[in-house]
Image (cartoon, rainbow, N blue to C red):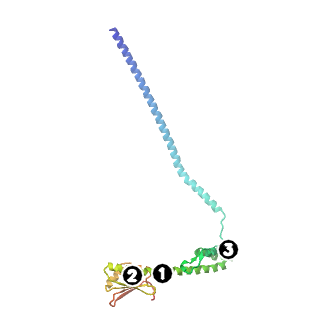
Amino acid sequence: MEYNLVSTGLLSSSAVILNEQSYFFHEEVKGTIIMKNQTLWLKKWWLISIFLIISGISILYQFVKPGVENQEHTIHNKEIEALPRHETTSIEHLEEARKALADDFRLNADPMKTSWGRVYDARVHLEAIIQNVSSEYGEAERLMKEVERREIEMERIYEIHTQKHLKKQRDELIEKLDKYFLGKGMDVSIRLEGKEKDILVLGSILWSRPLIYRTVNGTGFLESLKRLGFKKVTYDATHGYSWTFQLEENYEE
C-alpha cells in the first residue's frame, strides 16, 4: 500500500513536471513563431517602403524630365538662332535658276515626251531677283521669259492630252448610255456631233416635257456630261420637237 502511494506520488510529480515542461515548450514555440512573424512583417514593410520610395522617385522624374528636355531644346534653338545666317545673293539665285532650267531638259518630237526641266524652281529664284532689283535684273528678266514660254507650252500640251482623253471617254459613253436606256425600257438612238464629238444627241419618240424635266432637274446627268467635255446636249423627240441644253457658256458651233 505504501509502495502504491509512493508510485502514485511519483507519477503525479512526473505529470506536473511534464505539464510544466510542455507549457514552457509551447510558450517557447509560440514566442518563436511570434518573433518569426514579426520579423517577416518587418521584412514585408521594409520591401513595401523601398517600392514606394522607388515609385515616388519614378513619378517625380516623369514630371521633371519634360521640363529639362524643353529647357535643353530651347537652349539648342537659341544656339542655332545665334549662328550667322547665309542670305542667298542675286548671283546665286541666277545661277540656281540656270541650273533649274537646264536640269533634265530634253526636247522630243512627241511633245508628251518632252522634259521641261525644273520650271517652278527657276521661277522662284528669278522672282527673288526681280523683287530685289539688282545688277542681275536684266538677265533675270530674260530667263523669266523663257520660264513663261515653257509654262505656256506645258499648259498647251496638257490641254491637248486632256481633250484627247476626254474625247475617248465620250466615244465610250455611247455604248454605256445605250445599255442604260435599254435597262429602263427605252429605245434611244445616240450619236455624237461636232469636230471634237462634244455634242450629244439623244433621239427617242418617248421624250416629253415631264420626262426631260425629271432627267435634267432630278439627276446629275447634265453635270456629268459637262465634266466629260460636252458642250451641248439635244433631246430629239423625232416628231418635230426637240429640247437643247447648252453646257458651256458662249459656245459656238
Residue 55 higher or lower than 87, as above or below: above
Residue 144 drawn at (x, y percent): 61, 79
Q: What amino acid type should be assigned to the residue bearing mark 1?
A: Lys
Nearer to us in this view, 244 or 39: 244
Q: What amino acid type should be assigned to the residue bearing mark 3?
A: Ile
| Residue corresponding to mark 3 | 91
Q: Quadrant of residue 34?
A: top left
Q: Residue at x 53, y 49 (%)?
A: 60
Q: Quadrant of residue 32?
A: top left
- Label 3 Cα crowd, 10 Å radius (few <14 / some 14-19 / many 20+): some
Tag nearer the camera, 2 or 3:
2
| Residue corresponding to mark 1 | 164
Image quadrant in which the C terminus is located: bottom left
Nearer to us in this view, 67 or 149: 149
Mark 2–mark 3 distance (CA, rounded to whole Å):
58 Å
Secondary structure under tag 3 reads helix
Q: Who comes first in sequence, dot 2 or dot 1?
A: 1
Mark 2–mark 1 distance (CA, rounded to whole Å):
17 Å
